[in-house]
Image (cartoon, helix red, strand yellow):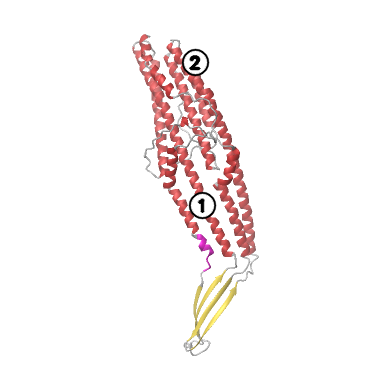
């Protein structure tokens, strides 16, 4: 027993180091607009880099310039037509210069639409530019959201890896102690095998986390237009980032002004209205003016000027039908705008509820689960030091504490996911930000039954609370 205690006492400084590095977050007020933490400089740099290099942004800007070129085209007059001809008396020979009714003909005709039609077409083209600009805003918002999701996912993975390294250190020490105890005949072989088993499980989790890190790095680098393997050193820690909150009314006001889908629907209404105006004007006739000259050789030349007008005699089948069509399309656009507004309001309400649930879950972690699991660990450590508990029960309690901390940062990441979707004005569900968890459900080592229960239950509650913030499908592929 003395040998075991001497070896185990070497772990006490390590216990103290972890306690110093990972103190349970202190309860405090949830931040609001006035108390929100400042922005992350690295995240801002990544966003700006993505905006400046992403090909989708360049494509959207090019499409805006292309749409602008359509405005002068839509306002331009129709192309004139040039007619060349000859009129001759008889078929035997040319009579030009000998017969007054024989001549060459050169005529120019210019169509002229009914006044106001060209201006309306120009307005429709200008609204097309606005619609393309709104589509560019959607591309930009989605890009920024994708960068944020990948960045916070990277912080989450690295936070889990940090916890994993702390956990791995203790299991390594535990393996050494159980090996020495077994060699001197003071421990069971099962303890040694279990310690080695848990080390292999941690290696398996590390492989999964490293894979997720590579995927997220590749996603961020693709969004930035860089090579997939480009390193991104981070200094921020996910557990130090508390989500900001904004009132529901403020989100609804922002959505009315900034939602690309809602703005696009409003532009669609305006385009439908101007298309209806154009259809009504199409019931009026168009004109054409023509001028020509007829050279007659040695005889004096002739000239001609004329005006023609189209006759909308089939207006009942064409122009009136076109007016009815555009009236129906205008009503459809109005219904679409109302549908978008309703869906946007629903999503904002959903995410407000999700954020409230996430903040309540985080408060439960800070004020309950983390405090209790840390107290359980410290109590197990004190009992071990006094010889009233086996050493492995200390490690079991430690695993439960680390598992709860892993669930806590998962919940933090999902709260950020809700805010990102809110800022994106995403009409779909809330894409999740998740990573391989550090579950302690399989860590029921040879301690007391109560200790095993404490280490298993918080892990399950942590996993459940991390999923509680999810409002939609998994994080979309980068």
Residue 334 vs 114, above or below: the answer is: above
Of the two numbered discs 2 and 1 in the rendering, the one whose residue sits closer to the viewer = 1
Q: Which quadrant holds the C terminus?
A: top left
Q: Which of the pair 374/433 is nearer the observer? A: 374
Q: Which of the pair 222/26 is nearer the observer? A: 26
Q: Which quadrant holds the N terminus?
A: top left
Q: Residue furthest front?
A: 34
Residue 465 vs 259, above or below: the answer is: above
Q: Position of residue 22 (x, y in %)?
A: 44, 24
Q: Which of the pair 440/469 is nearer the observer? A: 469
Report whether 57 appears left or right of 286: left
**Picture residue at 53% right of the left edge, 82% below the top:** 303
Q: Position of residue 228 (x, y in %)?
A: 38, 41
Query: Which residue lies under the disc numbered 1?
Result: 133
| Disc 2: CA contacts within 10 A as few (<14), some (14-19) or many (>=20) | few
- Magenta-colored segment: predominant secondary structure: helix
**Picture residue at 51% right of the left edge, 50% below the top:** 135
Q: Position of residue 347 (x, y in %)?
A: 58, 40
């Amino acid at each position: 027993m003395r040998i075991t205690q001497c070896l185990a006492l070497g772990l006490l400084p390590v216990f103290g180091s972890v306690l110093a590095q990972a103190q349970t977050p202190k309860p405090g007020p949830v931040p609001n607009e006035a108390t929100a933490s400042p922005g992350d400089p690295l995240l801002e740099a990544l966003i700006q880099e993505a905006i400046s290099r992403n090909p989708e942004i360049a494509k959207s800007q090019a499409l805006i310039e292309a749409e602008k070129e359509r405005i002068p085209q839509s306002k331009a007059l129709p192309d004139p037509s040039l007619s060349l001809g000859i009129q001759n008396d008889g078929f035997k020979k040319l009579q030009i210069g000998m017969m007054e009714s024989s001549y060459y003909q050169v005529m120019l005709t210019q169509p002229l639409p009914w006044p106001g039609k060209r201006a309306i077409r120009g307005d429709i083209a200008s609204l097309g530019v606005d619609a393309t600009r709104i589509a560019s805003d959607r591309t930009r918002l989605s890009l920024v959201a994708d960068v944020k999701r990948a960045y916070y996912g990277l912080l989450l993975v690295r936070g889990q890896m940090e916890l994993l390294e702390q956990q791995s250190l203790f299991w390594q020490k535990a393996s050494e102690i159980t090996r020495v105890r077994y060699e001197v005949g003071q421990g069971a072989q099962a303890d040694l095998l279990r310690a080695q088993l848990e080390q292999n499980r941690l290696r398996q989790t590390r492989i999964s986390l490293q894979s997720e890190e590579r995927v997220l790095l590749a996603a961020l680098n693709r969004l930035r237009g860089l090579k997939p393997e480009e390193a991104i050193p981070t200094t921020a820690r996910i557990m130090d980032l508390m989500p900001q909150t904004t009132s529901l009314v403020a989100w609804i006001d922002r959505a009315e002004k900034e939602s690309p889908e809602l703005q696009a629907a409003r532009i669609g209404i305006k385009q439908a209205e101007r298309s209806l105006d154009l259809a009504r004007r199409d019931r009026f006739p168009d004109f054409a003016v023509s001028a020509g000259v007829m050279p007659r050789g040695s005889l004096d030349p002739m000239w001609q000027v004329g005006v023609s007008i189209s006759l909308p005699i089939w207006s009942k089948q064409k122009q009136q039908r076109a007016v009815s069509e555009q009236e129906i399309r205008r009503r459809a656009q109005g219904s679409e705008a109302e549908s978008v507004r309703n869906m946007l309001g629903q999503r904002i309400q959903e995410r407000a509820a999700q954020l409230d649930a996430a903040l309540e879950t985080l408060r439960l972690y800070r004020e309950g689960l983390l405090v209790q699991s840390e107290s359980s660990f410290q109590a197990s450590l004190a009992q071990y030091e006094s010889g009233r508990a086996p050493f492995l029960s200390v490690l079991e309690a430690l695993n439960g504490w680390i598992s709860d901390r892993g669930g806590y940062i998962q919940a933090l990441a999902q709260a950020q996911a809700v805010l990102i979707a809110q800022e994106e004005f995403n009409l779909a569900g809330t894409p999740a930000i998740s990573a391989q968890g550090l579950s302690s459900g399989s860590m029921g080592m040879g301690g007391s039954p109560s200790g095993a229960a404490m280490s298993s239950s918080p892990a399950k509650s942590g996993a459940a609370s991390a999923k509680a913030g999810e409002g939609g499908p998994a994080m979309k592929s980068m």
